[in-house]
Image (cartoon, rainbow, N blue to C red):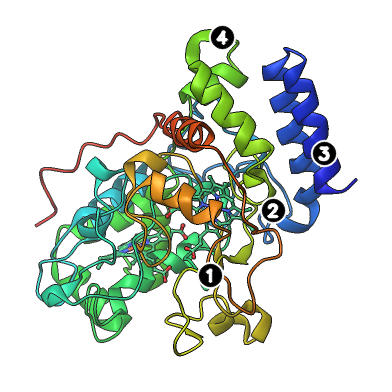
Amino acid sequence: MTGNEGQKGVFNVIKDHQPRWALIAGCLLFFVAFQSGMIQADPSTGSKKAPSASSGQASFELTLPLGLEKDSLVIPKDNPLTKERVELGKLLFFDKRLSANETIACASCHMPSLAFTDGQPVSAGIHGQKGGRSAPTAINRVFSSAQFWDGRAATLEEQSVGPFANPIEHGFKDHDELVAKVKSIAGYGPLFEWAFGSPAITTDLIGKAIASFQRTLLSGNSAYDRFTMGNEEQALSANAQNGLRVFVGKGQCLRCHFGFNFSDEQYHNLGAGWDQESKSFADVGRQAVTNKPEDTGAFKTPTLREIANTAPYMHDGSLATLREVVDFYDQGGIPNPRLDPVIKPLKLTEQEKQDLVEFMESLNGEGWTVTPPTQFPR
Ligand code: HEC
Ligand code: HEC
């Protein structure tokens, strides 16, 4: 089956007044067709079951909101989710003292009020220094192995300590400096013992704790989920339903944003960041990780859940609104020698564009409300 046949099928059935089942079938078809090669189960366990907690610790029951799939959870066997690890990870995520000048926490750029983004085109870290990339949401990371726009972190554990030694994020010289800082706060020792059974503090354990906390940040039970899975006919407006048809059909969006988390977990070149004058990319993206010329300018397909809360858009924050994103796709991205062949001018009508935006707005859900800690270890 090719992607196109699947989509036409879905599109026709939608017209036959069975929208919800058609959409579920459509998503499933795509999911099954691509899953084997594209969405990986945790490689270290080979299993998709959430590993159970080690002795003496309370396992953390991840309650998945409607629409999210248990079988796709990526929780490594050597870091089972426990209540203790999640709690410790939360403190570390919000603790500004864990930066070279005690001003920056993970939460400075992944703010709970903005669906764990920062609302900026590109993030500003320590001393206000700016990087070249936009902060993606930290939501639904439990469904992915590779992290970052270019997928350079193979696990969420690895991702969770990267920013500390980034000179323009938390600004520590290296991870030893991070560990020394955490150790200098006496109150953390007992918490590491509580979470890991030993008071030792290492980079590895800091990563495990923060990854555990991040795995609890979910988004599901959106209007879209209630419409497709919850039998709530009224959950999506007629316009949003039409937007969903465009998303699946004419817009070809489902080619990359598929499955329940709206991502194929693959890397594509849409042309964002291409400079026509110098004929080069400001950011080579995935190519820096793989060294393959064909990956130049390719970035990871992001989830679209909570998308209305995470402007501006794209890896470089170059598009301010969802409408600008739709116009970007409608014009066929930004032509460049390595543009993904799926990206072509769409010739959407004004109504289709508006409906597509309304559909994306229906992907705001729940499962990520977190009350930041008010007290930190001393
Ligand atoms: C100065 C702002 C800043 C700080 C501080 C920061 N981040 Fe990020 N975060 C970013 C940016 C920008 C990216 C995208 C970088 C990239 O892809 O290369 C990112 C990417 C991520 C991702 C990847 C999401 C995905 O879809 O792949 C996660 C998860 C994340 N950060 C969590 C954290 C954690 C945990 C911390 C604290 C240890 C942290 N961030 C600190 C700005 C920041
Ligand atoms: C060929 C694969 C592909 C197709 C088709 C595709 N996308 Fe994307 N989408 C991506 C990738 C990759 C990115 C990130 C690109 C970047 O940052 O340079 C992205 C980014 C986005 C973003 C911004 C996300 C964020 O967090 O900043 C939105 C919104 C979006 N796409 C919606 C759509 C819609 C709507 C369609 C259909 C009209 C569509 N996409 C079609 C791969 C695709």
Viewed as shown, does residue 255 lie left or right of 79? right
Q: Which tag is nearer the camera, tag 4 or tag 1?
A: 1
Q: Which of marks 2 and 3 is nearer the N terminus?
A: 3
**In the rendered picture of this protein, how many numbered marks are placed on residues?**
4
Q: Check contact, mark 3 vs mark 1: CB within 8 A.
A: no
As measured in the structure, the alpha-carbon distance from the residue carrying label 4 to the one carrying label 1 is 38 Å
Q: Which amino acid does label 2 sit on?
A: Ile
Q: Residue 271 carries which label?
A: 1
Would you say the beta carbon of the disc 4 residue lies within 8 angstroms of ligand 2? Answer: no
Q: What residue type is labelled 1?
A: Gly
Circle 2 residue: 39
Would you say the beta carbon of the disc 2 residue lies within 8 angstroms of ligand 1? Answer: no
Q: Where is residue 201 in the image (x, y as percent from the top left)?
A: 31, 68
Q: Position of residue 365 (x, y in %)?
A: 41, 29
Please give the name of the residue rendered at 58% of the width and 14% of the height, measured from the top-left corner.
230
Q: Which tag is nearer the camera, tag 2 or tag 4?
A: 4
Q: Which tag is nearer the camera, tag 3 or tag 1?
A: 1
Q: Earlier in the sequence, mark 4 or mark 1?
A: 4
Please give the name of the residue rendered at 52% of the width and 73% of the height, measured from the top-left corner.
152
Would you say the beta carbon of the disc 3 residue lies within 8 angstroms of ligand 2? Answer: no
Circle 3 residue: 6
Element class at badge 2: loop
The quadrant of the rendered image in which ligand 1 is seen is bottom left
Q: What residue type is labelled 4?
A: Glu
Q: Where is residue 72 in the image (x, y as percent from the top left)?
A: 64, 43
Q: Residue 233 carries which label?
A: 4
Element class at badge 3: helix
> For mark 4, does the 10 Å Cα neighbourhood hold few (<14), some (14 to 19), or many (20 or more) residues?
some
Please give the name of the residue rendered at 66% of the width and 37% of the height, measured from the top-left corner.
248
Q: Check contact, mark 2 vs mark 1: CB within 8 A.
A: no
As measured in the structure, the alpha-carbon distance from the residue carrying label 2 to the one carrying label 3 is 19 Å
Element class at badge 4: helix
